[in-house]
Image (spheres, helix red, strand yellow):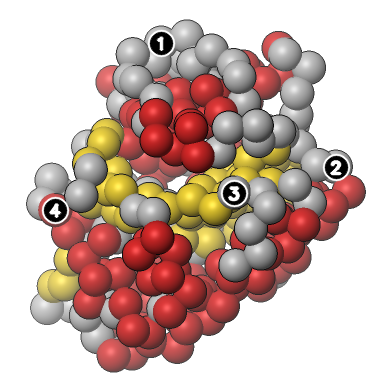
Amino acid sequence: MQQHSMTCLAPTISAILGLPAPAQCEAEPIFPIVEALAGTERIAVVAPDALGYSILERWRAEMPYLDSLCREDCMLLRSVMPSITPVNFATMVSGVDKSVHQIGAFTDDFRCETLFELLRAEGYHSAGVGRRGYTGAELLARHADIPGVAENNTDAEVERIALRIAREYQPEFTIVQLGSTDDVFHKHGPSSPEVLPTLHETDQRLRRMVEALGREGYSVIITADHGQHDTETGGSHGTDCDDDCLVPLTWVGGAAEG
């Protein structure tokens, strides 16, 4: 299976939209995705936090929708170090690692150009959506043109806000963080059967979001910021091991209904 750096996502999105990559980005676009989504005018990245490839492999039968997408089209992204949430969401929208974007916590400010500024300069619009107290709200929504903040701290509210923004504003680029997967993996460990209700709910949420976004003319990229590994007290991440760093990358064109 093809493997690419997390730094490749931003130039891929730029190329799909017919724009140059962010200024400091030296990574190449992922050309098969650019070709597959050619002609897309609006693109959304939906990222279930911590849903690493090893977790998907373990629980494929429990996530039939995401599994079906990955069996059709799937690559791997490798998280930049450290393999934690603010760092890698920052890389998703900048195309560079922490040494350049300088995001170590979601309260930090970018020290480089991001997709948000790039699109703004072209007269396009962006949205960032997530839960209050999470990177989606505190970093992405803070820098996007249209902030989507779920004050009730649920992925259900994130879904509702993301789809409302797509319907009412139709920004050319939207990035959405779903936080419940990371929460439950930390609590129980990603190999625990206790994570299954959250995985079922997330799989159904991804289906609804892809279908609804497709009706609004969006192509959708599904990936994650990092994975997790089991410990004696739950789940953890941050290391350079494959469980922490390899995440699935799949995509659906705007005309697809899932």
Q: Write down the quadrant of residue 132 in the picture.
A: bottom right
Q: Which mark is residue 169?
A: 2
- Identify the residue shown where x is 41% and y is 78%: 63
Q: Secondary structure at mark 2?
A: loop
Estimate the x, y position of residue 5 in percent, counting from the top left. Answer: 27, 34
Q: Of the residues shown, which amino acid type is indicated by label 2? A: Tyr
Q: Is residue 157 visible?
A: yes
Q: Which residue is mark 3?
A: 253
* Mark toward the start of the polypeptide (4 vs 2): 2
Question: In the shown orientation, is residue 115 left or right of residue 42?
Answer: left
Label 3: which secondary element? loop
Q: CA distance from mark 1 to mark 3?
A: 28 Å
Front position in the image: 161 or 82: 161
Above or below: residue 153 compared with residue 35: below
Q: Nearer the viewer, mark 4 or mark 3?
A: 3
| Spot occupied by residue 191 in the image (x, y as percentages of width and height) | 21, 80
152 shown above or below 127: below
The residue wearing badge 1 is 24
Disc 2 crowd, CA 10 A, few/some/many (<14, 14-19, 20+): few
Inter-mark Cα distance, 4 to 3: 28 Å
Q: Decide: marks 4, 3 in contact (CB < 8 A)?
A: no
Residue 128 horizontal side relative to residue 51, left or right: right
User: In percent of the image, x 39 and y 54: which residue is there?
Assistant: 73
Q: Earlier in the sequence, mark 3 or mark 2?
A: 2
Give the structural element (helix, strand or loop) at label 4.
helix
Q: Residue at x 60, y 67 (%)?
A: 258
Name the residue type under label 1.
Answer: Gln
- Mark 1 and mark 4: Cα distance apart in space: 27 Å
Image position of 44 (left or right of 170): left
Extreme residue toward the top, this view? 23
Q: Which residue is mark 4?
A: 242
